[in-house]
Image (spheres, helix red, strand yellow):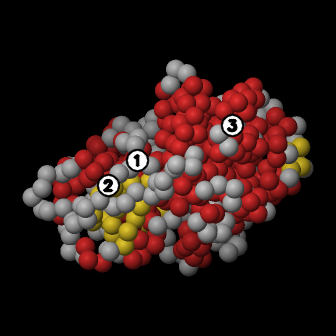
Amino acid sequence: MNLALYREFRPKTFDEVIGQDYIIKTLKNQIKSNRLTHAYLFCGPRGTGKTSTAKIFAKAVNCTHSFDGNPCGMCAECVALGEANTDIIEIDAASNNRVEEIRDLREKVNFPPVIGKYKVYIIDEVHMLTDSAFNALLKTLEEPPKHVIFILATTEVYKIPATILSRATRFDFRLVPMSVLVEHLKKVFDTKGITYDEKSLYLIAKAGEGSVRDMLSIADSVVSYTDGNLTKEATEKIIGLSDRDSIKEILLNINQKDINSLFITIKKSLNMGKNIQVLCKEMADFIKNLVMIKSGIEDYSVLDILPGEYSDYLNLANKFDIGYLKLAFSKFAQIELDLKYSLNPENLFEAACLSLIENVGTAPSVQPKPTAQTNPPVADKPINETEKLWGNVLLKVKENNLFALANALTTVNNVKRAQNTLIITTNDSMSFEMIDNKDRLDVLLKLAKMFDEDISEVKVEYDSKYASTQDIKDKLKDAFKSKISFK
Ligand SMILES: Nc1ncnc2c1ncn2[C@@H]1O[C@H](COP(=O)(O)OP(=O)(O)OP(=O)(O)O)[C@@H](O)[C@H]1O
Ligand SMILES: [Mg+2]
Ligand SMILES: [Zn+2]
């Protein structure tokens, strides 16, 4: 049975849109004060409400009985616009990206609306338009008829030409925070009469990774598998998380150099249907939490654990030496990608465990010491490997629509490498605070690993003495043909 919860729970009013408070407030104000502009750009990650908000907006500007900026859903206009109509025109640019189609649109925009005051064009995936189609669109945006509003939506805003950007009011949709997702999921389940325990809510919300749509479709599969009675165990199983007990046991086996039990635990875990790659990722995540807890972090927004689990983790963390935990973390993080391509992932995983056993007790702290190269690079030096890697990471950050992060990273003006740690320096304290966050550094680590698997840590430093170092930015700009821009 597929419920398609994400379709059933498409928001119908602004008030039902979650996690985009600033955008919703601004749009409502524009409607209430009748200060609309002719072109809007909705950008941001998938499944965060761009299309839904565009449709609500299209109705709201035509509604004759709107309340607090919301469409009423009952007036003649709302009813007519709820059905097939010619006033709200949705264009999927992915399949209508040619210049002919935009020219066609340019002719049709001149016809006045039939139902209400405005004709609203919603152009989804607008980044898919060809150059000539963009040019044609630009002409319309330059002098739009009074009765027309354009809403352009995209997940890849950096592909939109500056000429278009400068003519549209831009709204950046954000990934929705965990707590808001949990609250939403709770409402959805309660409405559907689905029973659940608190932990499954967290697990599903977490698996959604900030996208409401992704969360709801994951919820769908969990619900159909469990017949609407969600337990933590069932949820974990479906989402593919390894059970925590095996992870703990493997960790203990290694620490006690108990090879016999180690092999048995791994076998047992695999026999239960665990995927070795998932197991490895879970090991890395789990150990990372132990490292953080051992380093004194108590903040749930930084730690990746469920409420109430802290004392369990702390007890376990106290069983180990921090050097061992750091080593184990980097080991499992490192082989995570290798596993994907390995012909015998099980062997690879076991070999990693064995090599850890050899290091138990003798493990030095793996905290790499910065090398001698602490000065900013000199202007005429050609781009080095580390800088090239950093440039690639920057491009990936942009490709993944991490706007806020990308923005903060434009202030980075020194990049160096100390053993397997990538150290970036910014002279901007606000940007430093933004980047120096576990989740964000994790993202950077993941991206850096795509270009160099050996990298095991990304660190950010704040140093005002690089205030005038323009050098690395220039080099990157050259090397990446201006695909990267800086403040
Ligand atoms: N902010 C939100 N509030 C409530 N529900 C949301 C939100 N964002 C997404 N959803 C849910 O996800 C579904 C899809 O959302 P929508 O089509 O608006 O996302 P989108 O941002 O346009 O995604 P894409 O970039 O993939 O087109 C909605 O029907 C709704 O169930
Ligand atoms: Mg959309
Ligand atoms: Zn209405």
> Which corner quadrant of the image does residue 241 belong to?
top right
Q: CA distance from mark 2 to mark 3?
A: 36 Å
Question: In the image, is 229 to the left or to the right of 178?
Answer: right
* Residue 285 on image: x %, y %: 61, 49
> Which corner quadrant of the image does residue 12 belong to?
bottom right
Q: Earlier in the sequence, mark 2 or mark 1?
A: 2
Residue at which label 3 appears: 258
Q: Earlier in the sequence, mark 2 or mark 3?
A: 3
Question: In the image, is 164 to the left or to the right of 28?
Answer: left
Image depth: mark 2 or mark 3 in front = 3
Q: Are marks 1 and 3 in contact (CB under 8 Å)?
A: no
Residue at which label 1 appears: 455
**Which quadrant is home to the C terminus?**
bottom left
Badge 2 local density, few (<14 within 10 Å), some, or many (20+)? many
* Residue 3 on image: x %, y %: 78, 39
Residue at which label 2 appears: 417
Name the residue type under label 2. Answer: Arg
The residue lying at 65 percent from left, 45 percent from top is: 255
Q: CA distance from mark 1 to mark 3?
A: 29 Å
The residue lying at 75 percent from left, 25 percent from top is: 271
Q: Is mark 3 within 8 Å of ligand 1?
A: no
The residue lying at 25 percent from left, 61 percent from top is: 372
Q: Earlier in the sequence, mark 1 or mark 3?
A: 3
